[in-house]
Image (spheres, grey):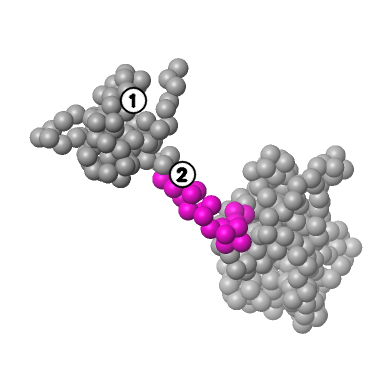
Amino acid sequence: MINLNLRHLYYFWMIAREGSIARASESLELTPQTLSGQLATFEGALDGALFRRVNRSLQLTDFGQTVFTYADEMFQTAQALTDVLREPPENRPLNLSVGIAASIHKLIAYHLTAPALSLSREVRLTCRSGDTGALLKRLGQRELDIVLTDRQPDSGEAGHFRSHRLASSSISLFAAPELATILAADFPASLDRQPFLATTLDAPYVTALMNWFANQNIRVKVAAEVDDSALIKVFGRQGLGYFAAPTAIRDEVCRQYQVVHVASIHEVRDTLYGVTRARSGHNAAVAQLLKERPELNDKLEKTEVKSR
C-alpha cells in the first residue's frame, strides 16, 4: 500500500498549477533544487513519472493528469475550508439538511422551511423527500438535521427522537370552477358520488377525511389515486375531480392552480411536526425553524376564519 505523502502531493500540485519548478519554488519559498528533489522522491514513491519535458517546459503525463485531478479537488476543498475557518464563527455558513415527508403538501413544506432562511448569515439548504420512516432512519444516522412530517415517531422510536409541533390547519376541498359550483350548492351532500382525487400517501389527515365522509353518508367515488400532492392539484385544475389540501395554503392553491375553494372541514386537521435527534444540539438554522412563530399561527387562524 502506498504511503501518500501529502506535502509531496502539494508540491506536485503547485508545480502543475504554476507550469514550472522555478515559478512553483517562488510561491513555496523553496529553492528549485529542493523542490526538484522533492518531486523526484514523490515520483519514486508512486513508481511513475508525473511530468515530461517538452521544449524546456513541463507537461503532465497521463498518470500525472490523473494524480493532478484528485489533488486539485483535495486542495481546492482545503482552501475553501480555510476560507470558512478564517471567518468569525457568527459569519460562517450554516448547512441545513431537511427531510420532508412526501405526504406533506409542498407549499406547506416551503412555509415551514422558510424561517430558517431568514437568518442574517448564509444557510446552505438541502431538502430530501421520502417516506417518514426512511427519513427518520437517515436522521438517526446524522444524514439529516431535521425531518418535517405529519406524524410523530412511534413508541419504539420515541427515545431516539424529539418531536416538535410546528403547525396545524383544517382541511379544505378544492375543485375547478364548474365542478366547484356544483359541490357548493348543497354541501356536503353534494359530494356524494362526485369524482374525488385521492392521495395514496399514508397521511393521517386522509384517514380522518375518509371517516368524515362516512359520517356524512357521502359515497366517495375515487377518480384517481395519486402519490404526488402537486400532481393531484394539476388534475383538479383540469376538472377531473375535487381534492383536499390544508386550509392554511388555500389562497396559494387557488392562485397557483386556478381552482376554487369549496369548503373547509374543521373536524379534519393536518398537524405537522419537526423531528430532531433526542440527544444532540441544534445549529442556529434548525433552532430558527423550530422557534415558535406567532405570525404563522396568526396566518393560519385568519385563513381558517375567512374560509368559514
Q: Which residue is drawn at 43% across and 39% down?
A: 74
| Alpha carbon distance from label 2 to label 1 | 21 Å
Q: Residue 50, how many percent across, how many down? A: 27, 28
User: Would residue 136 be found to the left or right of residue 252 on screen?
Assistant: right
Residue 63: x %, y % from top left: 29, 27
In this view of the protein, which residue sits in the foreground, 68 or 203? 68
Residue 10: percent from the left, percent from the top? 37, 36
Residue found at x 66% / y 47%: 144
Look at the image and tell me whether residue 159 can be seen.
yes
Instruction: Identify which residue is drawn at 35% across, 20% down.
Output: 45
Disc 2 residue type (three-letter): Ala
Sort mark 1 into few (<14), some (14-19) or many (20+) by Cα contacts within 10 Å.
many
Label count reads 2
Quadrant (top left/top right/bottom left/bottom right) for the C terminus? bottom right
- Seen from the viewer's position, the closer of residues 26 and 258 is 26
Percent x, y of residue 171:
77, 67
Q: Name the residue under label 2.
A: 78
The residues colored magenta run 76-96
Q: Does the magenta stretch include residue 95?
A: yes
In this rendering, the answer to whether 15 lies above or below 253 is: above
The answer to which quarter of the image holds residue 213 is: bottom right
- Residue reaching furthest to the bottom: 306
Which residue lies under the disc numbered 1? 42
Residue 299 vertical placement versus 119 (above, below): below
Classify residue 31 as left or right of residue 142.
left
Looking at the image, which residue is at 81% across and 60% down? 165
- Please tell me whether residue 243 belongs to the stretch shown in magenta: no
Closer to us: 4 or 259: 4
Magenta-colored segment: predominant secondary structure = helix
Indicate the amino acid at tag 1.
Phe
Quadrant of the image containing the N terminus: top left
